[in-house]
Image (cartoon, helix red, strand yellow):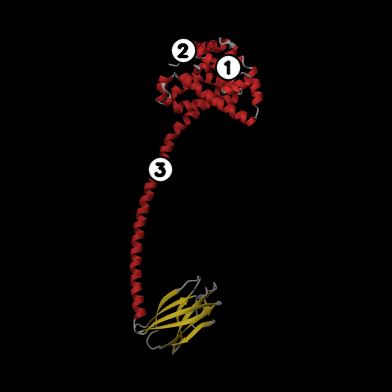
């Protein structure tokens, strides 16, 4: 029966402002419900929208992946036929750049008049320089390709040979200004006679 | 009142505050002896009642004692927290011991206008008619939240004596207060 003992204490008149504060505290939680509900709806809507966007994005990326895979397969076929063609001659040139030893590999296809060149282990260029590959022809050095190497990674490129009338007798590589040169002006990386 | 509270009628909460806030504040102040802390307890109590009124089971007792028990527990929690933090248990003990007779003092006549006053007078009278030794243990247990062994140490009485006195006091109070009902409609 001690439940009633609290009533044995004389009452105290609360300060007038206490009622407003107490009721505000008690009812605040209830009035937050609409806001919480709205927030929850926004979150759900956002989640659905994100899921829809992600689904569409995944779909697009899947299509892009398939397209790139088909392109890579075609390139593999091309490179494979290029490399294994009896008319293809393989030339490997060891080079030294920036104190590093690398390799320039040339697949020279005399049937299609194309070269496939792969450069491995070349030191990255200074910011204002680039590697330039040259065809050595009976009419002099002809620009073949300009390769600005900012990162340490292999580089592969396909090069059509000069027009008929110019006989390619070799290849060379030099370090040139970033925009390239019409004739070699910088240090030679290699010079090769075929 | 309970039905309207459970139906989330805000006006019912206002009515409940008007009817019970003076009693909750009085009880909290009796335990804490601090007006600001007692008002904090009042706020906590009505927030808790509003949020948990659906848990009140009328078959297990009226609404007012349920709310008073919430107020008492909250005030005792605050009291213990203060005692731990301030390490003033001895001063509190002396203050409570000196004021042990105040809870049965006759209140001023102006307070009779407060809702629930007749019920207060009955409970007050029932407590006042207890012999001093019984009233003392009830007061220490209810208003200070002391355990049986703590009361025994405080009064320097055997534990068995304390238990016997508490049991006797509860029987007497139960006899005198069994007819009480809420005055809330």
Residue on which disc 3 sits: A42
Q: Nearer the viewer, residue B38 or B95?
A: B95
* Residue A12 is at least partly visible in this image: no
Same-subunit check for callouts 3 and 2: no
Q: At 44% across and 18% down in the image, what residue appears?
A: B62
Residue on which disc 2 sits: B178
Q: Residues within 10 Å of mark 1 (few under 14, many from 20)?
A: few
Outermost residue toward the bottom in this view: A138
The picture places residue A45, in percent across and down from the top left corner, at 38, 45
The picture places residue A43, in percent across and down from the top left corner, at 41, 44
Residue A10 occupies quadrant? top right
Query: CA–CA distance between discs 1 and 3?
Result: 65 Å
Nearer to us: label 1 or label 3? 1
Q: Is residue B134 above or below residue A158?
A: above
Q: Is residue A138 left or right of residue B22?
A: left
Give the position of the N terminus of chain B as an image quadrant: top left
Residue on which disc 1 sits: B161
Question: Given contact means CB atoms under 8 Å apart, are the residues at marks 3 and 2 in contact?
Answer: no
């Amino acid at each position: 029966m001690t439940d009633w003992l609290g009533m044995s204490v004389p009452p105290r008149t609360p300060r007038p402002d206490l009622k407003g504060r107490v009721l505000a505290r008690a009812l605040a939680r209830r009035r937050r419900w609409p806001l919480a509900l709205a927030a929850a709806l926004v979150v759900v809507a956002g989640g659905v929208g994100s899921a829809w966007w992600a689904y569409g994005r995944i779909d697009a990326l899947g299509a892009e992946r398939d397209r790139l895979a088909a392109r890579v397969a075609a390139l593999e076929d091309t490179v494979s036929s290029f490399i294994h063609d009896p008319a293809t001659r393989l030339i490997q040139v060891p080079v030294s750049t920036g104190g590093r030893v690398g390799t320039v590999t040339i697949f020279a296809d005399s049937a299609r008049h194309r070269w496939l060149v792969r450069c491995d282990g070349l030191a990255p260029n200074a910011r204002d320089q680039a590697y330039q590959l040259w065809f050595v022809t009976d009419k002099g050095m002809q620009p073949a390709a300009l390769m600005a190497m900012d990162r340490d990674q292999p580089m592969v490129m396909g090069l059509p040979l000069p027009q008929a009338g110019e006989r390619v007798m070799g290849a060379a590589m030099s370090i040139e200004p970033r925009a390239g040169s019409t004739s070699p002006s910088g240090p030679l990386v290699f010079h090769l006679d075929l | 009142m309970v039905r309207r509270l459970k139906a989330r009628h805000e006006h019912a909460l206002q009515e409940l505050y008007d009817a019970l806030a003076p009693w909750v504040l009085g009880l909290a102040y009796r335990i804490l002896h601090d007006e600001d802390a007692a008002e904090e307890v009042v706020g906590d109590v009505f927030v808790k009642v509003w949020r948990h009124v659906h848990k009140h089971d009328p078959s297990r007792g009226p609404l007012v004692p349920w709310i008073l028990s919430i107020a008492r527990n909250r005030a005792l929690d605050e009291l213990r927290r203060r005692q731990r933090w301030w390490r003033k248990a001895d001063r509190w003990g002396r203050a409570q011991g000196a004021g042990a007779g105040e809870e049965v003092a006759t209140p001023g006549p102006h307070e009779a206008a407060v809702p629930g006053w007749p019920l207060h007078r009955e409970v007050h009278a029932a407590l006042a008619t207890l012999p001093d030794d019984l009233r003392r243990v009830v007061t220490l247990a209810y208003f200070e939240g002391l355990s049986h062994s703590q009361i025994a140490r405080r009064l320097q009485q055997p534990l068995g004596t304390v238990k016997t006195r508490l049991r006797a006091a509860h029987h007497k109070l139960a006899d005198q207060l069994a007819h009480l009902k809420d005055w809330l409609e």
